[in-house]
Amino acid sequence: MDFYSAVLMKAGLSLRGAIIIPNILFQITLFGLLFFLAYRLTGLKKVGALAVILFIFSGYPAPYLFESLLPQFAVEFLNPMYAVIMPQRTAIFGMAISFAVYIILYEALFKIEPESKGKSKPVLLYKELFLAGTLIGLLPYIHAHSFMATAFVSSALICIAAFKNGTNNRSSQYSAWKLPDMTDLRIFMCVFAPLILLSLPQILCIRTGVTDNFFVFFPGWTEKNSELILGLDWSFLCAFSSVARSFLLILYLWLLNLGILFLLLPLGLLKSTRAVRLFYLPFLLLFVGANLVKFQPWYFDNYKLFLHWYALTVILAAVAIFWLCDSVSKRRKSISAFVFIALVSSCIFFGVGTHVWMLEKDCQMWSGEELEVAEWVRDNTASDAVFLTGSAHNHPIPSLSGRQRVMGYEGWLWSHGMNWTCINARKNAELEMYKGDYTLVKAYGVDYVCICAHERAFASDNHFVINYSAFGDPTRFDLQFDEVIDGGSCRIYEVK
């Protein structure tokens, strides 16, 4: 996504336009694919439209946004737009590819074809599966969580389709055509050959950053639930009771966080076709797995896996809503619209509130004066210069000038799997450098030292005092920039 924005900037667009235009186009693509996925599964355009609405507007706000409305509420499953779609642009691209793969796999493996088209289906099936495998193979560098989810779901769907074909010749429901005899291996190859060839080099490269904090048994998704579950008595005599308590704890979490969607899901499954129920099974297994395993250091990132399950869940919820409305209209047509409005409103109430907050909230990332600082850095320092700065995620020097710094935002470093001991060691070195340790400044290859508002906040947060006198030594540091920025001094020293 950033590459597309860079291309648009080179083409003459402003920074704002280069960011907003790809976002809009890819979001339209994502929601369009979700609509067509729902339409393919159900044959109803109204289900597709409602599924998109539920996906965009359901979910809860972050707890600090509505503390008065949600006191002591275990909010974990946030609104998808707020939590991922808006702030993490590559997720849009990754999930769009995933939805395209799901459509292809449903068409190839589960779609019922007329008898007249039965003979042509196997040839088309191989092409569809090869395309699906190719798309999945491109995902690791685009969006790792979408790759994990889509690879798992695709593998399970192919196994389900092959098993159905082998056990009962795809049953009467699938009698229009069946997978060709003795070609299950060819079907697997059509998917996994391009998938492995394209994804393996990316996985091997990504693997270098994987630590022991990845793929950890972490039942209950949240830290609180995991601590409670692991703290239960798991001795032989109490194991059954602990399993039951763990199940109820996880069930309670999702009942609170999904609300009425949680109740609509089983009804939607019941009223869907057998093919849709089979198609949903891998997503349900993905949901169970993400409730048991932490796939990365930060537990909340499992949310990105849950989103794939959630996309199918809102489709089934839409099926349930329309079935309920149709059932009511047969008895009392006058209240059918009321039932529809009540059900949809209960699903999207908090999500709409989150969108209203996002529209009204004016979140400033950088001030105009900080933009000037970044421009000065770009114009007056080497492109490979290393800066000593605070670790704020929105520091203008690394964010807007593209210069390296000794250490980035700790939360992102940890969540991407960097060893926490190494992060702390580098952070402690930063503290000592700001206290005046010139030896460490040279050891880390620092070219410039920045002391602005972010650095003063960094010092305050970490309970130390910046040694201004040390940076006034003309034999070691040369003051290059000294301006008042946002009401406070901002100095940049060149290291001699």
Image: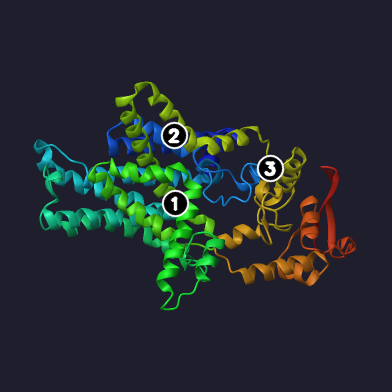
Please name whichever residue, 110 or 275, is drawn nearer the observer in this view of the structure.
Answer: 275
Quadrant of the image occupied by residue 65: top right
N-term-proximal mark, 2 vs 1: 1
N-term-proximal mark, 2 vs 3: 2
- Residue 456, image x, y percentages: 81, 55
Q: Which residue is mark 3?
A: 365
Between marks 2 and 1, how big is the CA–CA gap? 22 Å
Quadrant of the image occupied by residue 319: top left
* Mark number, residue 429: none
Answer whether residue 203 is visible to the viewer in this image.
yes
Quarter of the figure that contains the C terminus: bottom right
- Residue 51, image x, y percentages: 40, 36
Name the amino acid, label 3.
Answer: Met
Name the amino acid, label 1.
Answer: Phe
Please name whichever residue, 243 or 316, is drawn nearer the observer in this view of the structure.
Answer: 243
Q: Residue at x 42, y 55 (%)?
A: 140
Please name whichever residue, 200 or 250, is drawn nearer the observer in this view of the structure.
Answer: 250
Q: Secondary structure at mark 3?
A: loop
Q: Residues within 10 Å of mark 2 (few under 14, many from 20)?
A: many
Q: How many discs mark residues in the rendered view?
A: 3
Q: Residues within 10 Å of mark 3 (few under 14, many from 20)?
A: few
Up/down of 468 relative to 402, above or below? below
Q: Is residue 36 left or right of residue 126?
A: right
Q: Is residue 53 left or right of residue 189?
A: right
Q: Which residue is mark 1?
A: 306
Q: Is residue 260 left or right of residue 42?
A: right
Q: Secondary structure at mark 1?
A: helix
Q: Which residue is mark 2?
A: 343
N-term-proximal mark, 1 vs 3: 1
Q: Is residue 195 left or right of residue 297?
A: left
Disc number lying in front (1 or 3) = 1
